[in-house]
Image (cartoon, helix red, strand yellow):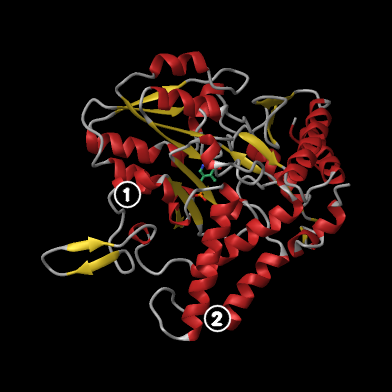
Amino acid sequence: MFDVESIRKDFPILSRKVNGKPLVYFDNAATSQTPKQVIDTIVEYYSKYNANIHRGVHTLSQEATDKYEQSRKKIQAHFNAKFSHEIIFTSGTTHGINLVANGFSSILKKGDEIIVSALEHHSNIVPWQMLCERTGAILKVIPMDLEGELILSEYDKLLSPNTKLVFVNHVSNALGTINPIETIIEKAHAVGAAILIDGAQSSPHIKADVQALDVDFYVASAHKMCGPTGVGMLYGKESWLKKLPPYQGGGEMIAEVTFEKTTYAELPHKFEAGTPNICGGIAFGAAIDYMNTIGFEAIAAYEHELLEYATAKLLEIEGLKIYGPLKDKASVVSFNLEGIHPYDVGSILDKLGIAVRTGHHCAQPIMDFYKIPGTVRASLAFYNTKSEIDALVEGVKKAKMMLS
Ligand SMILES: *Cc1c(COP(=O)(O)O)cnc(C)c1O
């Protein structure tokens, strides 16, 4: 039995009121809420052993360094990387993608091709466009269909010996589509291309095994998996991380500095210039521990039950359209009421204490594809309940009545 009521007690924020109503938090795809186990880790860090890492001989510095490196090992174990130095701490998914895109500036040549999908978040589009501008490489796009799925036969046509890099998300944040990354990775490798998977949206629901996937780069953000904002991870195969040049210069990333020449530190420090988000990195490990205690299989099964319930209930509302797959997706419901702007629905829901996201969800090309300004997105997490979904459905009905 999945005991959601006892899980909810771990999340202090879930007992607050918004506009006089109990908070119903359905904006989990933008950021997840934080359990007290993670909050306690943050408080403990600043109360007991706040110090800079890797440099000090003193006790606090050693304690902080140990905890930070233990956290890297937890992340390594969770994603099943071969070596802990293949895990680079970043400020989040966006930073990880930019780090890789920047590294490829010195690898790509004019005329090389890179492939993105139509289902991407802006942070997995713009850095690659910038890379193309710098190098003269060409950006190609795997198209999507009306069901919100990628058209793989078109992907086959785009692949060629000129393809150097492919990057797709595992789960679309706007629609919840789960992309068949195993196939996408295999096909990229078959033409000799490297592949990056944006795991920002999948990592809270699906445990990825980077070795089994044989992926070259995998990025995620702590704040979408019950951790704090401003910290994330980049996994890169050792051979790639050795090949890519550093992204930023500074302290911590050097072996030796003279004015003639600087040599770089070993992995992972080569990519970790400056003082990192030490507390955040440690709390990221605590968040992963927390989610593993509940268990990813249990999380996915319960969220799927919520998704089916929400989908069925919302579709009973006349004039409501859901975008993207109706089944076999992550727990995201992206919808509109006919003739009503999503923003207006979101504002009425907020008055009722219900937090949803409205707009293009940093995925404007998807909205352009459907020829809509945006959607109302309810993204569900393992600490949500069916009665919260009932409140959402009542709220949407109310919005429809007031706005039409
Ligand atoms: C949230 C998200 C990002 C960006 O993550 P940040 O934490 O803002 O850097 C990228 N891709 C997807 C699919 C996302 O959901």
Residue 229 in view of the camera: no
Q: Position of residue 311 (x, y in %)?
A: 78, 30
Crowd around label 2: few <14 · some 14–19 · many ≥20 (10 Å): some
Q: Is residue 386 above or below residue 319?
A: below
**Camera-side mark, 1 or 2:** 1
Residue at mark 2: 49
Residue at (34%, 18%) from the top-left corner?
Answer: 160
Q: Residue at x 63, y 77 (%)?
A: 44
Comes first in the chain, label 1 or label 2: 2
When the figure is inspected, residue 58 is found, relative to residue 35, above or below; the finding is below
Q: In this view, which residue lies farthest toward the left?
A: 260
Q: Is mark 2 within 8 Å of ligand 1?
A: no
Q: CA distance from mark 1 to mark 2?
A: 32 Å
Q: Check disc 1 and give the amino acid type.
A: Lys
Of the pair 13 and 295, the residue shown nearer to us:
295
Which residue has dot 1 on it? Answer: 242
17 over 302 or under it: above or below: below
Q: Residue 228: where, in percent of width, then height?
A: 58, 61
Q: Residue furthest front?
A: 82
Residue 183 drawn above or below residue 341: above
